[in-house]
Amino acid sequence: DQQVKQNSPSLSVQEGRISILNCDYTNSMFDYFLWYKKYPAEGPTFLISISSIKDKNEDGRFTVFLNKSAKHLSLHIVPSQPGDSAVYFCAASSGLDSSYKLIFGSGTRLLVRP
Amino acid sequence: ETGVTQSPTHLIKTRGQQVTLRCSSQSGHNTVSWYQQALGQGPQFIFQYYREEENGRGNFPPRFSGLQFPNYSSELNVNALELDDSALYLCASSLDGTSSYNEQFFGPGTRLTVL
């Protein structure tokens, strides 16, 4: 039972254009959502997060949108750069769980073409 | 400030053997979580240790066990290895994993292959 789903295994965009990565979740108890980026041979690195009390959070070129009614979040990267090419994981956490463990999606591989 | 480190980088074992993976957390981080990432999947939570006690466990059998030490190091032990245990094992440390959400910093992982 996958609680966090990333239905697009890969995405290819032109440098300078917008990249939109999508994520769906099923557990309404999730109240914190994160995006991690992973390069080969490295661990995931935190990118941006959003609390369930917000619907948008921006950090430079990265914006995360949360639609609680649809249980959907998305990551927008504008403008996309070749260095953004990596695997992006969506993750969710619940404050009802004392471990605040992360539940990850299966990832989307982003390729930004020069 | 040093990041999270893991050893070894790669490991090959045979079915039925036992393995110990090691993690060194960032200084001052009293919480460590372990994740298993199978090929083509996202990381899956194994368990978390907070101040040397287990604080939460995912859907993994008891042959997966752990230890956390006062010096910010920790271990993941897996007994009776099975072929499906082949995966990337990630540890993540955080400042305090029990009071509120705190950013988890991941190590580069240990790639375990079971033959």
Image: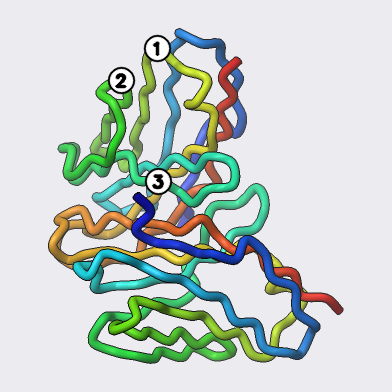
The label on residue B63 is: 2
Q: Is residue B78 above or below residue B68?
A: above
**Res B64 → quadrant:** top left
Write down the chain letter for disc 1: B
Check disc 1 and report its element: helix, strand or loop. Answer: loop
Which residue is nearer to you in this view: A17 or A59? Answer: A17
Kind of residue indicated by mark 3: Gln
From the image, tell me which residue sits under label 1: B80
Q: Are marks 3 and 2 on the same chain?
A: yes
Q: Is residue A20 left or right of residue A74?
A: right
* Residue B46 position in % (x across, y down): 33, 39
Kind of residue indicated by mark 1: Ala
* Residue A81 position in % (x across, y down): 74, 81
Check disc 3 and report its element: helix, strand or loop. Answer: strand
Q: Is residue A79 above or below residue B93?
A: below
Write down the chain letter for disc 3: B
- The reply to whether the C-beta atoms of the residues labelled 1 and 2 are less than 8 Å apart is yes
Query: Badge 2: how crowded within 10 Å, few (<14), some, or many (20+)?
Result: few
Kind of residue indicated by mark 2: Arg
The label on residue B44 is: 3
Check disc 2 and report its element: helix, strand or loop. Answer: loop
Which residue is nearer to you in this view: B10 or B15? Answer: B15
Q: Is residue B4 left or right of residue A100?
A: right
Q: Residue at x 65, y 47 (%)?
A: A41
Task: Check the picture and name the quadrant holding the C terminus of chain B.
Answer: top right
Q: Is residue A38 above or below residue B61?
A: below
Point out the tag, 1 or 2, that comes first from the N-terminus. Answer: 2
Question: What is the spatial separation of the Cα atoms under label 1 and label 2, in whole angstroms?
Answer: 7 Å
